[in-house]
Amino acid sequence: MDPQQFAKQMIEFEKATLDNTFNAMSMVQDQMEKMTNLMMDQAAWIPQEGKKVVNDYLATCRKTSSDFKTMMTDGFNQIQSCFCKSE
């Protein structure tokens, strides 16, 4: 097998693995957010400031994982473009 073709297949495999892992992580994160919001709605003893802190934390986690996904996708696209140019 051609080494460039092998490298391209490896990159595609790794990108697919990233996408699948990220999708699974997103499902877990969604479930965690739902459970946390449900718990906070039922816990009257948690002050509004505490709820705001938790909601800000959840939003930060969501944004950080989205930024990570964007960064990794851009990196894979750059690597793929390097292999496409060399053909």
Image: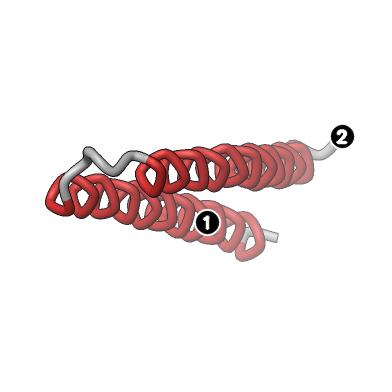
Q: Amino acid at mark 1?
A: Thr
Residue sitting at the far front: 44
Rendered residue at 64%/46% (across/down): 23
In the displayed structure image, the side of residue 66 where residue 15 appears, left or right: right
Relative to the observer, which residue lies in front, 40 or 3? 40
Q: Position of residue 69 (x, y in %)?
A: 48, 52
Q: Quadrant of the C terminus?
A: bottom right
Rendered residue at 81%/39% (across/down): 2
Relative to the observer, which residue lies in front, 19 or 79? 19
Relative height, residue 21 to residue 64 (above, below): above
Q: Position of residue 36 (x, y in %)?
A: 42, 40
Q: Position of residue 48 (x, y in %)?
A: 17, 53
Q: Is residue 7 visible?
A: no
Rendered residue at 35%/57% (across/down): 63
Rendered residue at 47%/45% (across/down): 38
Q: Which mark is residue 59?
A: none
Q: Quadrant of the N terminus?
A: top right
The alpha-carbon separation of the residues under discs 1 and 2 comes to 26 Å
Give the residue number, with chain letter if any, for mark 1. 73
Q: Position of residue 31 (x, y in %)?
A: 57, 42
Q: Quadrant of residue 28?
A: top right
Q: Amino acid at mark 2?
A: Met
In the displayed structure image, the side of residue 12 where residue 38 appears, left or right: left
Residue sitting at the far right: 1
Of pointers 1 and 2, the one earlier in the residue sequence: 2
Give the residue number, with chain letter if any, for mark 2. 1
